């Protein structure tokens, strides 16, 4: 794929080498997202200016530990989510993509922040995560966005709003019910009136891939009340509750947790079948 866009990439590289202040997003505007994703994985030696602006990639071990996947397969899933998210937000009008103020809620090692550098100047991108190792990895690999630690039960955010777009990939797939409700409320207080929150949730089918521990009970709870949570035994309680584990929920149950939100759209990507993408708009 890089060969197909060799001329455009060479032109972008020249522009970046001639102008240290040129945003990467401006130079890469005509480069397809899939090609940009390939560059995130590996930049040819001939594109030194682009290489100097891109974060280095986390190791396969880190990628696998955080997501269960790595390399091109994980990049395909990441590209699919970003495309879906911008399609959801773009349909609402408002600001141009490059002018949006964006928050990655639960940024991990910066998997998606890397891709958003194609669209948005780094100073408009923000990432928060409650685990210091995630923030450390983002900084070690040169993620140029604004980064900060958040609380495990986030009653406030370390950045002031409003944000035009907030996304949380595979975050609400791990939260207890009360923590999910608190997080949705906190994000609601930092979203622009015409903004959008994109999250992923797990369908009941997730439990068939989870393993024997609690699988049958979780399927029953999901079907009975629309929500199932299996806390991780090695996690310390926060305010008397283990807040992190594995979670599935229905769209209908999400609506009961999301006070002040309206479910605007639901999408699904075949390359990542156990992550349902849900867009929520302020109500």
Image (spheres, rainbow, N blue to C red):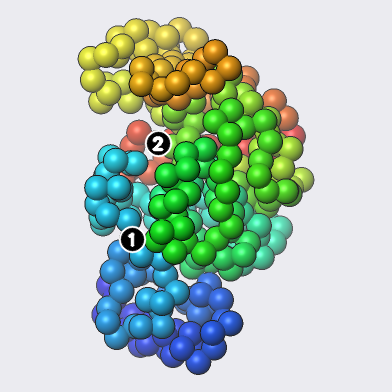
Residue 211 is situated, as x and y percent measured from the top left of the image, at: 23, 20
In the rendered view, would you say 263 is above or below 167? above
Residue at screen point 47% across, 61% down? 143
Label 1 belongs to which residue? 57
Residue at screen point 30% across, 48% down? 63
Label 2 belongs to which residue? 275
Q: Secondary structure at mark 2?
A: loop
Q: Secondary structure at mark 1?
A: loop
Which label is found at residue 77? Answer: none
Please tell me how crowded label 2 is: few (under 14), some (14-19), or many (20+) other residues with Cα within 10 Å. many
In the rendered view, would you say 9 is above or below 194? below
**Image quadrant assignment for residue 203:** top left
Left or right: where 24 falls relative to 206:
right
Left or right: where 41 falls relative to 132:
left
Residue 195 is situated, as x and y percent measured from the top left of the image, at: 69, 48
**Image quadrant assignment for residue 86:** bottom right
Residue at screen point 49% across, 31% down? 172
Left or right: where 111 falls relative to 149:
left
In the rendered view, would you say 53 is above or below 79? below
Q: Quadrant of the N terminus?
A: bottom left
In the rendered view, would you say 14 is above or below 241? below
Residue 15 is situated, as x and y percent measured from the top left of the image, at: 49, 88
Is 171 in front, or is 139?
A: 139
| Residue 253 visible in the displayed image | no
| Residue 154 visible in the displayed image | yes
Is 82 in front, or is 54?
A: 54
Q: Quadrant of the C terminus?
A: top right
Residue at screen point 42% across, 70% down? 54
């Amino acid at each position: 794929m890089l060969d197909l866009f060799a001329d455009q990439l060479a032109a972008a590289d020249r522009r970046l080498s001639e102008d240290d202040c040129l945003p990467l997003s401006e130079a890469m505007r005509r480069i397809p997202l899939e090609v940009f994703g390939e560059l995130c994985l590996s930049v040819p030696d001939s594109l030194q200016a682009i290489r100097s602006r891109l974060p280095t990639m986390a190791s396969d071990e880190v990628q696998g530990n955080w997501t269960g996947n790595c390399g091109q397969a994980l990049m395909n899933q990441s590209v699919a989510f970003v495309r879906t998210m911008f399609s959801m937000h773009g349909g609402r009008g408002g600001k141009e993509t490059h002018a949006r103020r964006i928050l990655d809620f639960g940024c991990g090692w910066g998997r998606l922040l890397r891709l958003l550098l194609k669209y948005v100047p780094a100073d408009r991108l923000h990432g928060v995560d409650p685990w210091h190792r995630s923030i450390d990895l983002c900084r070690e690999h040169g993620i140029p966005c604004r980064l900060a630690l958040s609380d495990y039960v986030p009653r406030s955010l370390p950045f002031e709003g409003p944000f035009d777009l907030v996304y949380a990939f595979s975050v609400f797939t791990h939260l207890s019910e009360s923590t999910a409700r608190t997080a949705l409320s906190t994000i609601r207080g930092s979203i622009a009136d015409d903004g959008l929150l994109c999250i992923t949730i797990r369908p009941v089918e997730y439990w068939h891939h989870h393993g024997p521990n609690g699988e049958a009970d979780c399927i029953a709870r999901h079907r009975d009340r629309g929500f199932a949570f299996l806390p991780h035994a090695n996690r310390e309680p926060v305010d008397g509750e283990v807040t992190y584990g594995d979670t599935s929920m229905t769209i209908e149950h999400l609506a009961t947790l999301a006070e002040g939100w309206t479910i605007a759209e639901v999408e699904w990507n075949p390359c990542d079948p156990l992550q349902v993408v849900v867009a929520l708009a302020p109500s």
